[in-house]
Image (cartoon, grey):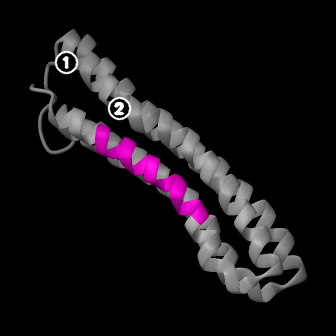
Amino acid sequence: MTGVVLAFLGAALAVILAGLGSAIGVGLVGECAAGVITEDPDKFGQTLLLQALPGTQGIYGLLTGFLIMQKVGIIGGALVDLTLHQGFYILMAALPITVVGYLSAICQGKAAAAGVGLIAKRPEELGKAIVYAVMVETYAVLALLASIMLLFGIVI
């Protein structure tokens, strides 16, 4: 059962840390957006769009956690008795989205918060503000893909 505990740890870390990074990133943007909305309530839609962007890493961590739970049989089947090595492999497969998801969500929040400042002065530049924030997303997507490919490569 030790392997199962390591697999659960991988799922939990992916969900917790990627979600925590998203919460921090979304919060950063929300703080900036609230200041802008104080001056110009019509910019709510633009700022909300930017605020939503750092939330995707939490979704990626949750997806990875679900894939791990499905792989070990918690979702859709009976619990698989994993060896210590198999559990360790699953834990390691969760690390890309765990670490990159956490850090990129915070960095994306900072980029999106700067974008809120941009649209406060020049609302017609929303597209540019989004592009700056989405560039950070690229690395979260790559980390998600790495975690998924690693998980699919583990034979149970």
Res. 69 image quadrant: top left
- 114 sits left or right of 132 in the view: right
- 70 sits left or right of 116 in the view: left
Q: Residues within 10 Å of mark 2 (few under 14, many from 20)?
A: many
The residue that disc 2 covers is 94
Quarter of the N terminus within the rendering: top left
Residue 134 falls within the magenta-colored stretch: yes
Residue at position x 28%, y 16% from top? 88
Residue 41 falls within the magenta-colored stretch: no
Residue 101 lies, in percent from the top left, at 49, 42
Main SS of the magenta part reads helix
Which residue type carries mark 1? Gln
- In the image, the segment drawn in magenta is 132-146
Res. 156 image quadrant: top left
Mark 2 vs 1: CB contact within 8 A: no
The residue that disc 1 covers is 86
Does residue 55 sit above or below 11 in this rendering?
A: below
Camera-side residue of 74 and 121: 121
Does residue 71 sit above or below 80 in this rendering?
A: below
- Does the image show residue 34? yes
Which residue type carries mark 2? Ala
- Does the image show residue 62? no
Camera-side residue of 83 and 28: 28
- 100 sits left or right of 9 in the view: right
